[in-house]
Amino acid sequence: MNKTLEAIRRRPGMYLGSHNRHFTCLDGFLGGYQVGFAAAKCGNEEPQNLVPHDFHKFVTEKFGERFPAGGRGFQWFIEQNTSSEREAFDLFFALLEEYDQKQSGK
């Protein structure tokens, strides 16, 4: 797992404020990070993706759909399969951990 995501997982309030385990806030942070990195162009560095590009495919297939499933990303599947912001937040990290384990087993 990316170091930044691991830090968010351990101390979400430091990154997400008072709604520290809200999936919507996490998703907003991830999007803002990408936009900020692209806008700053950070020298010759490639944009750093906090979430692996093929994580969308992994989550889509995890929930029994065929990627790209109408363009719905991991966010949609997580929100559809949870009943609260906190549950969605926790599911995101559980899926990311499962994804990482699968990648390291290849």
Image (cartoon, rainbow, N blue to C red):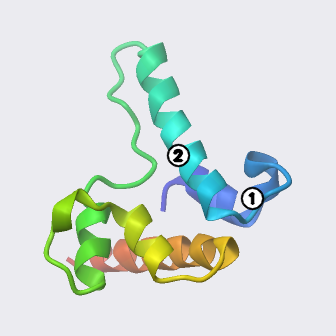
Q: Residue furthest right?
A: 18
Q: Is residue 30 above or below residue 97?
A: above
Q: Measuring 61% from the left and 70% from the top, which residue is drawn there?
A: 89
| Frontmost residue, 64 versus 80 | 80
Amino acid type, mark 1: Pro
- Residue 77 is tagged as none
Across and down, in percent, residue 76 comes to 40, 66
Q: Residues within 10 Å of mark 2 (few under 14, many from 20)?
A: some
Across and down, in percent, residue 44 comes to 33, 16
Residue that label 1 marks: 12
Q: Measuring 39% from the left and 43% from the top, which residue is drawn there?
A: 49
Q: Is residue 30 above or below residue 40?
A: below
Across and down, in percent, residue 33 comes to 53, 36
| Frontmost residue, 80 versus 4 | 80
Q: Is residue 71 left or right of residue 52?
A: left
Give the alpha-carbon distance from disc 2 to disc 1, as whole Å: 13 Å
Amino acid type, mark 2: Leu
Q: Measuring 60% from the left and 44% from the top, which residue is drawn there?
A: 29
Q: Is residue 94 above or below residue 67?
A: below
| Residue 30 visible, this orientation | yes
Quadrant where the C terminus sits is bottom left
Q: Is residue 49 left or right of residue 20?
A: left
Residue that label 2 marks: 30
- Looking at the rendered structure, the secondary structure element under dot 2 is helix
Q: Residues within 10 Å of mark 1 (few under 14, many from 20)?
A: many
Q: Earlier in the sequence, mark 2 or mark 1?
A: 1
Across and down, in percent, residue 57 comes to 23, 67
Q: Is residue 106 left or right of residue 80?
A: left
| Frontmost residue, 59 versus 71 | 71
Asked whether the beta carbons under mark 2 and mark 1 sit within 8 Å of each other, the answer is no
- Looking at the rendered structure, the secondary structure element under dot 1 is helix
Q: Residue furthest bottom?
A: 64
